[in-house]
Image (spheres, helix red, strand yellow):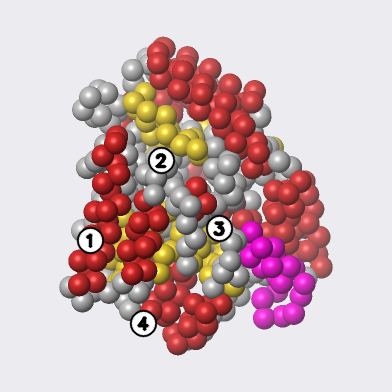
């Protein structure tokens, strides 16, 4: 092994000693990454990788205006959000402006887990109830509440056995595999609505239904048409609230829609955002109605020392400026459509590709051993990701079967990079990885 490889391995060994075992890392022998620029990452050996997986950085890595704005703010003032400064107000106003009425009231936090957890607490407070409905194959975070409604068995084989009794789990509305495939996918929504009504009739009135508005963690799969409209209606009929987890799907990634819920033609009662909001700088938010937010008082009080700090708020504003000025959402639509078209063409030549899911720059290339049985090609997916790394592309498996390429690059990715990814994947599939 060369010195850069030894250096990378030594760092991993130190990391393993310092971290709890549960904290995984990408790849058995990951390169040591030193810097990033746009959709590229650079290792300590000078190798450049195309980052096809990083939805934490929609603006791209090393964004100069974001870096300059945060650096300036850190030199000037950084403190908690109880002080009176402009950026926290300006960011909250601009975030709320991006949401439809009546979503106008903002809570600022530091991460997606905090945002979904707070969304649940707001719903519990507003309804005075304790039961929550979630769906299979979902991930919402690691805190007690957000983890409770996370059902994905990809990283936690015990997920379903260990849900608290206040969590009620619906089938994953997966139109490709699962209970109802293809045209039968229209059956997921009425069945979910029936389960919610039955739950209410049994006395477990739901405080909320929580779901991603596009099945990100399940493989980059859009929900069946009309799914959220029907399920939101059912939960509201029982007096519960609709929580949209936009941590992954929101902020323009779906191309045509800034928010995932727009793609479904609904308006949620509570929205959780994070990841893209700070382009990697810790920032998350919950946006709801004034009326629902007011009920939070019944539960106690809300304050986050660093949520909405001057530096976080400035990061949030710089990200929104970049979305306004740099055509990121349009690029997600255009490069995303080009990328999806090319991947679909690959599927006509490589039988391992069972489907190309997704919208905009949230795509999922699902590998199957058999297109009839849909047997997941999980080991193959892992081997393909390893081979892609050797050829200069960072890519990871996702989904409960870990057989989907989690294709969600920075939104600034250009066509040449998208083509490089497809050409390299074509080569890997042809070689037999
Ligand atoms: N919700 C969704 C849909 C997510 O994908 C994630 C993170 N993968 C979270 C919530 C939690 O976000 P964080 O890691 O910032 O706590």
- Camera-near label (3 vs 2) is 2
Q: Position of residue 75 (x, y in %)?
A: 80, 64
Q: Which residue is mark 2?
A: 221
Mark 1 and mark 3 residues within 8 Å of each other at the beta carbon: no
Could you tell me how far apart the alpha carbons at marks 4 and 2 are, in whole angstroms? 33 Å
Q: Which residue is mark 4?
A: 128
Q: Residues within 10 Å of mark 4 (few under 14, many from 20)?
A: some
Q: Position of residue 21 (x, y in %)?
A: 37, 52
In the picture shown, does residue 272 fall above or below 33? below
Could you tell me how far apart the alpha carbons at marks 1 and 3 are, in whole angstroms? 30 Å
User: What span is in magenta?
Assistant: 79-98
Q: Earlier in the sequence, mark 3 or mark 4?
A: 4
Label number found at residue 274: 3
**What secondary structure is the magenta-colored segment mainly?**
helix
In the picture shown, does residue 251 fall above or below 128? above
Q: Secondary structure at mark 1?
A: helix
Q: Residues within 10 Å of mark 1 (few under 14, many from 20)?
A: some
Q: Which residue is mark 1?
A: 195
* Label 2 within 8 A of ligand 1 by Cβ: no
- Camera-near label (3 vs 4) is 4
In the picture shown, does residue 111 fall above or below 415? below
Q: Earlier in the sequence, mark 4 or mark 2?
A: 4
- Camera-near label (1 vs 3) is 1
Could you tell me how far apart the alpha carbons at marks 2 and 1 are, in whole angstroms? 22 Å
Q: Secondary structure at mark 2?
A: loop
Q: Earlier in the sequence, mark 2 or mark 1?
A: 1
Q: Earlier in the sequence, mark 1 or mark 3?
A: 1
């Amino acid at each position: 092994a060369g010195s850069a490889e030894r250096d990378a391995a030594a760092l991993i060994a130190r990391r393993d000693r310092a971290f709890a075992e549960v904290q995984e890392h990408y790849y058995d022998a990951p390169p040591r990454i030193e810097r990033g620029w746009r959709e590229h990452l650079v290792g300590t050996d000078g190798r450049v990788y195309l980052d096809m997986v990083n939805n934490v950085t929609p603006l791209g890595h090393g964004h100069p205006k974001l870096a300059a704005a945060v650096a300036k703010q850190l030199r000037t003032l950084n403190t908690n959000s109880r002080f009176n400064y402009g950026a926290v107000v300006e960011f909250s106003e601009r975030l709320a402006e991006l949401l439809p009425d009546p979503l106008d009231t903002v809570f600022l936090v530091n991460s997606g887990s905090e945002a979904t957890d707070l969304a649940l607490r707001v719903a519990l407070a507003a309804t005075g109830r304790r039961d929550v409905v979630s769906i299979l194959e979902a991930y919402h975070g690691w805190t007690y509440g957000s983890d409770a409604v996370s059902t994905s068995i990809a990283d936690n084989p015990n997920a379903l056995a260990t849900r608290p009794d206040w969590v009620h789990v619906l089938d994953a509305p997966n139109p490709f595999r699962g209970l109802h495939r293809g045209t039968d996918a229209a059956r997921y929504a009425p069945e979910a609505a029936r389960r919610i009504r039955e739950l209410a009739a049994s006395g477990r009135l739901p405080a909320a239904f929580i779901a991603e508005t596009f099945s990100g963690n399940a493989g980059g799969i859009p929900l069946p048409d009309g799914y959220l409209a029907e399920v939101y209606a059912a939960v509201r009929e029982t007096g519960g609230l609709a929580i949209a987890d936009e941590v992954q799907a929101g902020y323009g990634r779906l191309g045509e829609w800034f928010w995932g819920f727009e793609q479904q033609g609904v308006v949620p009662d509570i929205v959780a955002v994070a990841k893209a909001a700070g382009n990697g700088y810790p920032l998350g938010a919950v946006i709801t109605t004034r009326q629902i937010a007011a009920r939070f008082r019944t539960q106690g009080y809300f304050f986050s020392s660093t949520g909405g700090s001057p530096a976080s708020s400035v990061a949030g504003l710089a990200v929104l400026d970049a979305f306004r000025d740099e055509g990121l959402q349009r690029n997600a639509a255009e490069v995303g459509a080009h990328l999806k078209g090319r991947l679909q063409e690959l599927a006509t030549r490589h039988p391992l590709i069972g489907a190309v899911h997704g919208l905009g720059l949230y795509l999922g290339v699902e590998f199957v051993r058999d297109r009839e049985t849909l047997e997941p090609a999980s080991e193959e997916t892992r081997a393909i990701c390893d081979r892609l790394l050797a050829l200069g592309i960072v890519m990871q498996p996702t989904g409960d079967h870990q057989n989907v390429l989690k294709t969600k690059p920075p939104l600034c990715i250009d066509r040449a990079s998208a083509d490089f990814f497809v050409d390299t994947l074509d080569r890997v599939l042809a070689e037999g990885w």
